Amino acid sequence: MSSSVPGQTKSSTARVLTQEELDRLSSDRILVSDFKQMKLEKEAQKNWDLFYKRNTTNFFKDRHWTTREFEELKACREFETQRLVLLEAGCGVGNCIFPLLEDDLNIFVYACDFSPRAVDFVKKNPLYRPERCCAFQCDLTKDDLRENVPEGSVDVVTLIFVLSAIHPDKMSVALQNISRVLKPGGVVLFRDYGLHDHAMLRFKAGRKLGENFYVRQDGTRSYFFSKESLAELFQEAGFQSAANDYILRETVNKKEGLCVPRVFLQSKFTKPDQSLSS
């Protein structure tokens, strides 16, 4: 284990559960019916659109931690003055991209989201400039990214709390879609929910869709990744693993007066440069 950010620990192994937590997870065996699961898949876009209608731009804090925790963004430059091309797949309302655009003037961002409403919020942001950012609606599991992003043109893709919202059966298709617009040697920076995160353990009975896969009350879904399953998923899509660690944090839930264990996966995957290996 090691830690580079105060209050959080990097770990190569999953969080160890208490006996009570183990009992709770093992007793939750009944899955949501196939009919309801099909309905959730069909209405996934509508449910995310309603989420953004309810929460507008207030739910997520601006992610100023992106440049702090993902120093790779700077390391991705071959030379200091290089203009980086970034794709944020699943941009939401722009909480990640706008701090980045402010922080790094030599960057162009493609930003897409499943929710048309979220994309509208991005375009209405006063910091949105078409010469520095191109936002568009996209279902990563169906729509070809190349309709909006030139093939092999992107230096860095960020996948931040996005893949977990996609049905596990379709995650591989989404990664292949991303791979097509990424340059050979390009990088995917990943952060998402990790196995045994507090959010996973607090789901009540009747919310389980499959192994490590759950539905929230608002109909949006969440998958909790083990580092092994994530590595396998990226490998199958043709990526190589450069970093893949659990991030363990203790967060205070002020409303409930509890200190809760959060678990995330923070990872880095690269698209092989065939010209270097040949």
Image: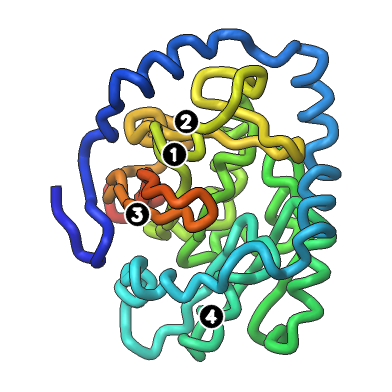
Q: Earlier in the sequence, mark 2 or mark 3?
A: 2
Name the residue that disc number 4 marks: 99
- Mark 3 is surrounded, within 10 Å at the Cα level, by few (under 14), some (14 to 19) or many (20 or more) other residues, namely few
For disc 1, the marked residue is 198
User: In whole angstroms, how far apart are the C-alphas of marks 1 and 3?
Assistant: 44 Å
Callout 1–callout 3 Cβ contact below 8 Å: no
> Which is nearer the N-term, disc 3 or disc 4?
4
Which mark sits nearer the N-terminus, 2 or 4?
4
Q: Tell me the distance, in whole angstroms, between the alpha carbons under discs 1 and 4.
A: 28 Å
On screen, 203 above or below 54?
A: above
Label 3 element class? helix
Estimate how packed mark 2 is, as few (under 14), some (14 to 19) or many (20 or more) residues with alpha carbons within 10 Å. some
Per the image, the residue denoted by label 3 is 275
Q: CA distance from mark 2 to mark 3?
A: 45 Å
- Circle 4 sits in a helix, a strand or a loop, which is it? helix
Which corner quadrant of the image does residue 43 belong to? top right
Mark 4 Cα-neighbour bin, 10 Å: few <14, some 14–19, many ≥20: some
The amino acid type found where label 4 is placed reads: Pro
Residue at 40% x, 74% y is 67
The residues bearing labels 1 and 2 have C-alpha atoms spaced at a distance of 5 Å
> What's under tag 3, amino acid-wise?
Ser
Which secondary structure lies at badge 2? Answer: helix
Circles 2 and 3 in contact, beta carbons < 8 Å: no
Q: Mark 2 or 3, which is nearer the eye?
A: 2
The residue pinned by badge 2 equals: 201
Give the amino acid at mark 1.
His
